[in-house]
């Protein structure tokens, strides 16, 4: 692939992945599918059933839904989407909810007209929303990615057929050219005007919710606790603002986040620490923009190996990328960037994903702390040796190895996590 093709593909990848979403992306995906189904039903539903894979159940169970008055869970997300969502707004589908729609949603839920069924599937991100009303039924099925509706059926007749075979290994833009060297070359050379609108939006949205999280009353107020409890400094601020943004989002804040790899928390973790570092260190704006592009693509590169949903915490990948981007901003060599990645993955690849919730903010803070320790070691020319633990001789091999562990090795772990969470519900 030549340089021009790489640039075109990398710009397409960024446009696909760095999109706005309001609220945790899994409940938003449910709401989106429900309002798409409602459009085909042509009336308010009399009953709704959501058939969800284990990973969907895990990631929706504990988070607050935006514009819901504090409602949580699958039933709330689906019903609110059906009664108040606007499918034309994509991942900001619930920004259209009115007080009247919320009241109808609450009455519908109180009447027990929405239920959840476990969907046995080998696809981590997989669900079917079934709406019933006046003798009609509509089913919307989503696979692999949050807005990838593969089928809409009304009374058994297929109205829409999407790309069922477009799994995680077949995204729209070609990812095959992604590697550390090519990502760095793109970040170094892409004309600024080609990335500026995208990155301006990322900086604005993700820092706005970070400021909201640090000043507002969300969850445990982890951002303020970090700032008041740790020695003041750039790493403390990086952790505090990123964690605060995540906590606000997990608590139902209705401000949009620019996501990465289908995840708002990964969008936050891969951007907010980089922005805070650059501002604290007076890094030139152009260098910051290039570092954010580097971080975004490195996050995507790692997640392509792991998959959208897994038992592997995505905060690790995103924070690893952010701190490698700090090494990039600080003038580190390719070798030092790779050392930052290896040093991070030698430390924290075992953080579990046990669903989306406010404690994701703590995992982001922990991962940034580990990533910055990896950065400082790398800048001192220190790196863990190959073949110690899971580290391989080349950094790309380590990324692939960690991806295999997250995608394949932790499948049984994922099933056990879901089983334990469902047992707790009972």
Image: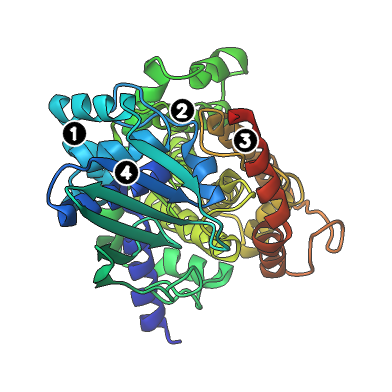
The span from disc 3 to disc 1 (Cα, nearest Å) is 30 Å
Q: Upstream in the sequence, badge 2 or badge 3? A: 2
Q: Which element carries disc 4, helix, strand or loop?
A: strand
Query: Could you tell me which residue is drawn at 41 percent across and 29 percent down?
Result: 72
Look at the numbered disc 1 and give the secondary structure of its residue.
loop
- Which residue carries the number 3 mark? 421
Give the quarter of the figure containing the N terminus.
bottom left
Which type of secondary structure does the marked residue at label 3 adopt?
Answer: helix
Mark 4 or mark 3, which is nearer the start of the sequence?
4
What distance separates the C-alpha of mark 2 from that of mark 3? 21 Å
Q: What residue is shown with label 2?
A: 247
Q: Is residue 276 above or below residue 191?
A: above
Q: Earlier in the sequence, mark 4 or mark 2?
A: 4
Q: Residues within 10 Å of mark 1 (few under 14, many from 20)?
A: some
Q: Residue furthest front?
A: 135
From the viewer's perspective, is 243 left or right of 193?
Answer: right
State whether residue 200 appears in this view: no
For the question of whether residue 225 can be seen, the reply is yes
Q: Nearer the viewer, mark 3 or mark 4?
A: 4
Separation of marks 3 and 4 at Cα, in angstroms: 23 Å
- Mark 2 touches mark 1? (CB < 8 Å): no
- Give the residue number, with chain letter if any, for mark 4: 48
The residue at which mark 1 appears reads as 97
Q: Residues within 10 Å of mark 3 (few under 14, many from 20)?
A: some
Badge nearest the viewer, 4 or 2: 4
Q: Are marks 2 and 3 in contact (CB under 8 Å)?
A: no
Q: CA distance from mark 4 to mark 2?
A: 30 Å
| Mark 1–mark 4 distance (CA, rounded to whole Å) | 18 Å
Counting residues from the start of the chain, the first of labels 1 and 4 encountered is 4
Q: Residue at x 20, y 24 (%)?
A: 103
If you read the primary sequence from the N terminus, does the residue marked by circle 3 or circle 1 appear first? 1
Q: Could you tell which of marks 2 and 1 lies nearer the N-terminus?
A: 1
């Amino acid at each position: 692939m030549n340089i021009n093709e790489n640039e075109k593909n990398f710009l397409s990848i960024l446009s696909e992945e760095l999109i706005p979403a309001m609220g945790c992306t899994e409940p938003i995906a449910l709401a989106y599918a429900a309002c798409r189904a409602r459009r085909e039903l042509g009336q308010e539903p009399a009953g709704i059933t959501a058939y969800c894979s284990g990973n969907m159940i895990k990631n929706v169970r504990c988070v607050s839904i935006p514009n819901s008055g504090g409602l949580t869970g699958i039933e709330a997300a689906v019903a609110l989407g059906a009664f108040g969502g606007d499918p034309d707004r994509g991942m900001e589908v619930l920004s259209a909810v009115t007080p009247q729609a919320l009241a109808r949603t609450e009455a519908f839920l109180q009447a027990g007209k929405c239920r959840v069924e476990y969907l046995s599937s080998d696809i981590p991100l997989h669900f079917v929303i079934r709406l019933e009303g006046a003798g009609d039924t509509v089913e919307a099925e989503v696979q692999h990615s949050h807005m990838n509706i593969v089928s809409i059926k009304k009374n058994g007749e297929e109205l829409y057929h999407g790309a069922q075979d477009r799994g995680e290994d077949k995204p729209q833009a070609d990812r095959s050219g992604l590697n550390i060297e090519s990502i760095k070359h793109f970040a170094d050379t892409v004309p600024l005007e080609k990335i500026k609108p995208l990155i301006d939006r990322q900086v604005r949205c993700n820092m706005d919710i970070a400021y909201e999280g640090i000043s507002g009353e969300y969850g445990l107020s982890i951002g303020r606790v970090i700032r008041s409890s740790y020695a003041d400094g750039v790493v403390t601020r990086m952790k505090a603002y990123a964690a605060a943004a995540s906590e606000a989002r997990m608590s139902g804040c209705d401000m949009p986040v620019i996501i990465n790899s289908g995840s708002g928390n990964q969008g936050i973790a891969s951007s907010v620490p980089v922005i805070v570092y650059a501002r604290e260190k007076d890094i030139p704006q152009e260098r910051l923009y290039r570092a954010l592009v580097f971080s975004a693509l490195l996050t995507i590169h790692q997640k392509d190996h792991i998959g959208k949903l897994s038992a592997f915490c995505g905060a690790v990948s995103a924070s690893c990328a952010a701190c490698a981007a700090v090494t990039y901003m600080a003038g580190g060599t390719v070798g030092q960037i790779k050392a930052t990645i290896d040093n991070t993955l030698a430390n924290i690849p075992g953080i579990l994903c046990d669903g989306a919730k406010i404690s994701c903010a703590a995992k982001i803070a922990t991962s940034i702390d580990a990533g910055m320790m990896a950065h400082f070691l790398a800048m001192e020319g220190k790196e863990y040796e190959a073949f110690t633990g899971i580290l391989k001789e080349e950094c790309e091999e380590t990324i692939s190895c960690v991806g295999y562990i997250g995608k394949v090795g932790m499948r049984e772990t994922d099933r056990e996590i879901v089983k334990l969470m469902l047992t707790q519900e009972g």
